[in-house]
Image (cartoon, rainbow, N blue to C red):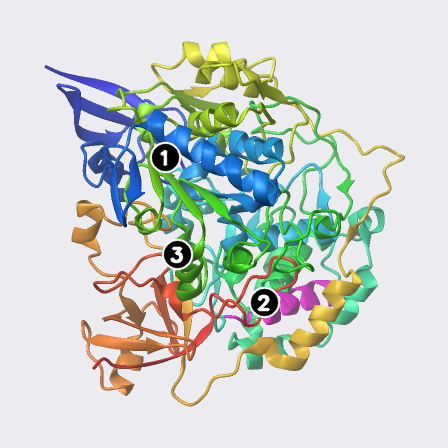
Amino acid sequence: MSLVRKSFCRNCGATCGVELEIEDNVPVALRGDRDNPVSRGYFCIKGVASLERQQGLGRLPGSLKRTGGELEPIAMDAALDEIAARLKELVDRHGPASVGLWFGTGAFSSSLAISVGKGFASSLGTPQIYTTQTIDQSPKAITALRMGAFKSGKQNIATSDVWLLSAVNPIASHQAGWGSHTMYAPGAALRAEKKRGLKLIVIDPRRTETARLADIHLRPKPGQDVAVNAALLNVILSEGLHDQAFCDRYVGNLDRLREAVARYTPEYAEREAGVPADDLRAAARMFGGARRGATSSGTGSNMAPFANLADHLLECLNVVCGRYRRAGETIINPSILSAGPVGEGVYPPYPIWDHSPKMASHPEAGWACPTEYPANLLADEILHPDGLKALIVVAGNPLMAIPDYTAVRKAFEHIELLVTLDVRMSETAELSDYVLACKTPYERADLALMTDGNSPFPAAQYTEPVFAAPGDALEEWRILHGLARRMGFPITWEFSNYGSPPTGRQMVLDVDDDPDSDELFDFICSHPEAPFSRLKANADAVGLVLADMALPKVLPASPEDMARLDVMPPEVAAEFEQCFATHQRQHLDDGQLLLHSRRLLEAMNSNYLDSETILRRQPVNTLRMHPDDLARRGLQDGQAVAVDSGHAALTTLAEADPTQLPGTVSMHHAWGVGPEKIPVSVLIDKDGMREAHNFVPRMSGIPVTVRRAG
């Protein structure tokens, strides 16, 4: 007899509502939930892989321990006993900072893993926290920490006249920023916004699925984001399209910004980036001339040379045009996981790297994001005599994700204790001393964190477990709590949603406590109109729209709050000078192409790349090339090619792709090729062209040569 249970997918941040058809406790089908009021039946190919994992494909049958070079089965309790003893011994010998934690993509789809995990680290006394954020998104944090941030958040796309998407392809990635396009059926949502009159500007070298919807598509050479963003600012400021009243009240150093971008005329940007000057002027006038609308970006420009500066300038477009929610404006999608007034005003700049512990391997390096060290320096920290001795990897695959695969592998083979918490045997797990089997998403209760404040209306999603976990598999937060209990310390943690400041509220998990997830969810859900009891009562439906919720309004700024957004601090000005002098460090030898990152509809970072369904659609991480570039090199579609960055090389198959900008090639990140599963990150020199504070190397816009393999 079959039955149907509702839940939501956790393969990416969209967390679409799903229905699982079950026979004899085995899922046989997975489909979008048409009754879910948040995602309304939308579902994509990425989620299908989660069905295969639940059916057992690639699933870890139990926990493992390395014995004599081989991984052998071990009971969870025994593994926790041994790991806790080894961690305690390392802490006694080297101090708490000898232990670190890595949080991967899977951890970001769990409502408890990161918050409790960071609490584990702070309670132990270690500052050694690393996440995927400092690989592909940290320039956004650097911008907020150097410029400051506007408290009320950006205007919402649903009430906007124009929107600018830079280096992001939401139709494939399903990623969005708060206030931006919805993650649920993003293509249909953008088409609906355009039908009501929204003007869409897209900046992307490739003619992506999203770019095809654009009113204006700017196609710069990869790595020339500074030139494009500066030229847009030049036109807006020189033609008086900015919001002078907003700038007078909330912006500092506007004249210095105006002076810095003055030399980036549209004609200069055309020479640097290859974008026609007339198109740059048209885009600037479309954006600056609108009444409402903002910018948002993805990982593309955050991985390229001068990524911090490019992101800073993109946010300056929002700043000079005053594209933030203002006093008296109704907040149509307030957070319902936390309560608190939202008002105008500025969080002042706060250089957290000057106020955080420093790394042993790099005394100049502190946290790049709140509580997080730069991921690019992890290998150095492991190899330093006073650095990391143990690393706990939570739901991630850093071996494949961190730049410079060869260096990272060397470090992981060197570390004294490597522990991986996962549902599958990843490449990182294969090198680990212990691999602890975790529950799959459909085996745990969860809140959909990205739904909160990121939907077109006040909404939440809560799911209870659909299946019982096999054997002694545990949730990630329970494993960390189990280690803390054995090591003899309580975990004090506070909830912080992705991209939001901590609430300041703390909960203690004592050594004698054995709480269930409901107690933690009850702590998280602090809004008086949406207590956890209300979400739990709706668990059968999963998705919940709070139609009866009184929508708050943005409050005026406090008269005493005179903080300003600094659009040209001295450090940014120095980067601007260096960028202009070096032409954004983009120099190509004869015959070289520019390799840039790309998203695939089928994959989210390294998640589920072993899925049979996905591999039928995309069996190889191919090198996408414009047909003209293939022809010039005497290459053919499907031919084996060698890709050489000068730092390293890999071999894959070429794929003709007319959406590529001629002179460019692209591959999906974190996906290995060949029998040894070598990822694209092997091409990246982790020590070359690093950014300030986040130490991000050039991960996109990489000059490469492409030739016939063999």
Packing grade of label 3 (10 A; few <14, some 14-19, many >=20) is: few
Q: Quadrant of the N terminus?
A: top left
In x, y percent, where is residue 437? 31, 33
Q: Secondary structure at mark 3?
A: helix
Check contact, mark 1 vs mark 3: CB within 8 A: no
Marks 2 and 3, how far apart at CA: 25 Å
In x, y percent, where is residue 68? 27, 47
Residue at the bottom extreme, as displayed: 590
Q: Residue at x 60, y 52 (%)?
A: 140
Residue 89 shown in magenta: no
Left or right of 512 on screen, residue 174: left
Packing grade of label 1 (10 A; few <14, some 14-19, many >=20) is: many
Left or right of 246 on screen, residue 53: left
Going from the N terminus, do you reach mark 1 or mark 2 first? 1
- The image's mark for residue 10 is 1
Going from the N terminus, do you reach mark 1 or mark 3 first? 1
User: Which residue is tagged 2?
Assistant: 690
Q: Residue at x 45, y 18 (%)?
A: 517
- The image's mark for residue 413 is 3
Which secondary structure type mostly characterizes the magenta part of the structure?
Answer: helix
Marks 1 and 2, how far apart at CA: 33 Å
